[in-house]
Amino acid sequence: KVQTKEGFQVLSIRPTSFEKAPLQDTTVTVETIEVAEFTDSVWVGESVQQSDRPDLGSAAVVVSGGRGMQSGENFGLLEQLADKLGGGAVGASRAAVDAGMVPNDMQVGQTGKVVAPDLYLAVGISGAIQHLSGMRDSKTIVAINKDP
């Protein structure tokens, strides 16, 4: 139990800090309210990329590559590995994204997606703190790197 004398508290919790709560049969009351129409913005559109891979943020297996992959074409090897591991998601470090190897929606880390899979494979990733902050809640982490 935590107590404080302050009137307002701000609490920040990482989305992967807890296991998913079990679904429960609950009933709720829905209340409709009237609000003024908001006209200060205009919908421009949306662009959604379709993929056969699971969502990076909710995949049970994530295989990520870094600058050590040397080119975007080599990320195909990671896709093959993810397929062998049951169709996992493929991610990337910020260095790989900044080098133009892969699109930024594959980025795992502080400025990318936060992941917490059962198995996280890091291939050719330096282990920068920005990347670690996005995958440290993974259950099992395997790093493949030629650096000692």
Image (spheres, rainbow, N blue to C red):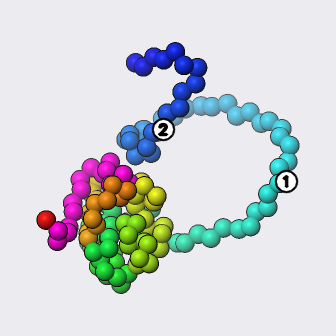
**Residue 100 spot, x, y in % from top left:** 44, 78
Vertical comparison of 5 with 55: above or below: above
Boundaries of the magenta span: 132-147
Label 2 sits on a secondary structure element that is loop
> Can residue 60 be seen from the camera position used here?
no
Q: Is residue 21 magenta?
A: no
Q: What residue lies at 21% left-to-right and 60% top-to-bottom?
A: 142
**Residue 136 spot, x, y in % from top left:** 31, 50
The quadrant of the rendering that contains the C terminus is bottom left
Q: What residue lies at 41% left-to-right and 76% top-to-bottom?
A: 99
**Dot 2 corresponds to which residue?**
12
Please count the marks in the image.
2
Label 1 sits on a secondary structure element that is loop
Front disc: 2 or 1: 2
- Upstream in the sequence, badge 2 or badge 1? 2
Between 114 and 53, the residue placed more toward the observer is 114
**Dot 1 corresponds to which residue?**
39
- Occupied quadrant, residue 61: bottom left
Q: What residue lies at 86% left-to-right and 43% top-to-bottom?
A: 36
Crowding near pointer 1: few (<14 within 10 Å), some, many (20+)?
few
The reply, left or right, for residue 120 in relation to residue 112 is left
